[in-house]
Image (cartoon, grey):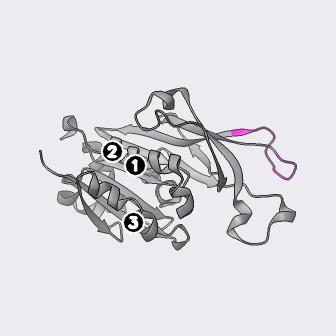
Amino acid sequence: MAQRRALVVRGGWEGHQPVKATELFIPFLEDSGYAVRVEESTEVYADAAEMADTDLVVQCMTMSQITSAEVAGLSAAVIAGTGFTGWHGGIVDSFRASSDYLHLVGGQFATHPGKEPCERHGEAEDNFLPHTVHVTDLGREHPITTGVEDFDLVTEQYWVLHDDLIDVLAVTTHPTQEWHPWHRPVTSPAIWTRRWGAGRVVVTTPGHSLDVLEHPSVRTVIERGMVWATRTASAS
């Protein structure tokens, strides 16, 4: 059996520490039998031959920009069976100007509500809220999240705009507060999968900082998601 090939693409906004964050997971990939290639830009997405030989793309590229040729190459690879996964802004707050990219992923970061205004001090912690990630009924049966119980975090709680072609494995609910403009609680997907052609996409929205990525439940979901998303024999 040929060795599986993983491509780690990282960069963009430094606040999400793309190098340190991806370095947490490269040993897992190598220990799981993947040959790992690391790229610091999305230029590789336009290399059709390289993408055709890639079984899994792990992306950590917050904001930034992508060319039409690059997003077309990524999309074509996923349709042909290449897996695509990532966490937090590295996958759902990437390439905001590319509707084709958003269509591929199925969800887009909208905001992360913050603390009461009087408690904010202009720091990242202004947006760190205690919240729970609830595993759905589907998630309790899915290989990525089976055995993972609901878990609590104090970090950014992503509010995500999404379509109906995602399979939601976990959710989180934004409550109403007197300083918020919305009038009822809003539930957002926190972990989801998406079938796209012959490929599989996995998104995990927690992951703002290294301590969140090292949370046992978050890390388990990300690692299982990498394996599940990887090209299957039927897509070869």
Q: Earlier in the sequence, mark 3 or mark 1?
A: 3
Residue 70, magenta (yes or no): no
Amino acid type, label 2: Val
Prevailing secondary structure class for the magenta stretch in the rendered image = loop
Whether residues under marks 3 and 2 lie with C-beta atoms below 8 angstroms apart, the answer is no
Q: Is residue 88 in view?
A: yes
Disc 2: CA contacts within 10 A as few (<14), some (14-19) or many (>=20): some
Q: Quadrant of residue 137?
A: top right
Amino acid type, label 1: Glu
Q: CA distance from mark 3 to mark 1?
A: 13 Å
Disc 1: CA contacts within 10 A as few (<14), some (14-19) or many (>=20): some
Q: Which residue is mark 2?
A: 227
Looking at the picture, how far across and down is residue 95, in whole percent?
47, 61
Looking at the picture, how far across and down is residue 198, in whole percent?
28, 38
Q: Which residue is mark 3?
A: 23
User: In terms of depth relative to the viewer, which is nearer, 48 or 168?
Assistant: 168
**Image height check: is 3 above or below 125?**
above
Q: Is residue 73 rendered to the left or right of residue 221? A: left
